[in-house]
Image (tube, rainbow, N blue to C red):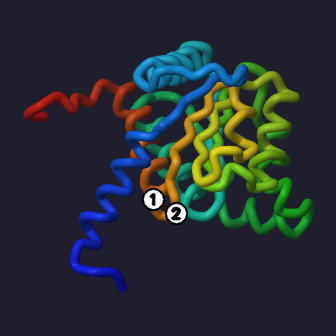
């Protein structure tokens, strides 16, 4: 166990990861962070207006985030959003089709052109996440990625909009991703974080 300043050090590391957020288009062109959230919220608005769906996926803690945000987007924002993290679905996919197809197979069944895929991957290199991105691209979907850890991770360049946090550990990366997912939702529904609120 580290010294007596552990909390302060953790808080600083998390703050640094959030401050280091880099967003890029598929072309690799950087997008200013506030503008990126404007674009992302615009995608969700278009989904709602067109009666389309958002799909979220991730492994481990990221699966929990996907479930959580799918509920909140549907209930709070009125944007139909699904996550493929049901235990029966995941175990059937792993057993019958291989875990690398755990998300791509159901996405191929349910998603349509014009829907939105959002992937959440700390490493950005999970084979089942990369496979799902490939499936989404083949179906003509919009794709947004959240990744971290190595700056050269594969997911980071595959989405139409790519959010990367330079978290040095899984805990910091996951915590940053959870915060960023809430920024997206809270901005969309108009939650105020101005001084005093």
- What is the number of the mark on residue 172? 1
- Please tell me how crowded label 1 is: few (under 14), some (14-19), or many (20+) other residues with Cα within 10 Å: many
- Please tell me how crowded label 2 is: few (under 14), some (14-19), or many (20+) other residues with Cα within 10 Å: some
Image location of residue 89, percent across then percent down: 74, 60
Q: Is residue 37 left or right of residue 52?
A: left
Give the camera-side residue of 7 and 47.
7
Residue drawn at x 48%, y 48% is 177
Image location of residue 166, percent across then percent down: 52, 48
Q: Quadrant of the N terminus?
A: bottom left
SS at circle 2: loop
Q: Residue 151's quadrant in the figure? A: top right
Give the camera-side residue of 158 and 70.
158
Q: Are marks 1 and 2 in contact (CB under 8 Å)?
A: yes
Q: Quadrant of the C terminus?
A: top left
Residue drawn at x 52%, y 59% is 168
Say if 16 sits above or below 9 in the image: above
Q: Is residue 115 visible from the viewing direction of this image? A: no
């Amino acid at each position: 166990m580290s010294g007596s300043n552990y909390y302060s050090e953790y808080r600083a590391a998390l703050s640094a990861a959030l401050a280091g957020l880099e967003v890029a288009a598929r072309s690799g062109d950087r997008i200013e962070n506030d503008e990126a959230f404007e674009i992302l919220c615009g995608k969700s608005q278009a989904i709602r207006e067109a009666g389309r769906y958002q799909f979220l996926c991730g492994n481990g803690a990221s699966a929990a985030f996907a479930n959580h945000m799918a509920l909140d987007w549907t209930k709070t924002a009125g944007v139909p959003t699904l996550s493929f993290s049901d235990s029966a679905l995941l175990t059937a996919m792993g057993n019958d089709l291989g875990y690398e197809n755990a998300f791509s197979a159901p996405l191929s069944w349910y998603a349509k052109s014009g829907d939105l895929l959002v992937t959440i991957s700390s490493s950005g290199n999970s084979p089942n996440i990369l496979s799902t991105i490939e499936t989404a691209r083949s179906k003509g979907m919009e794709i947004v990625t959240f990744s971290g850890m190595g700056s050269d991770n594969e997911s980071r360049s595959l989405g139409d909009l790519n959010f990367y946090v330079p978290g040095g550990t899984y805990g910091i990366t996951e915590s940053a991703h959870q915060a960023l997912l809430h920024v997206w939702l809270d901005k969309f529904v108009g939650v105020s974080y101005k001084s005093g609120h």
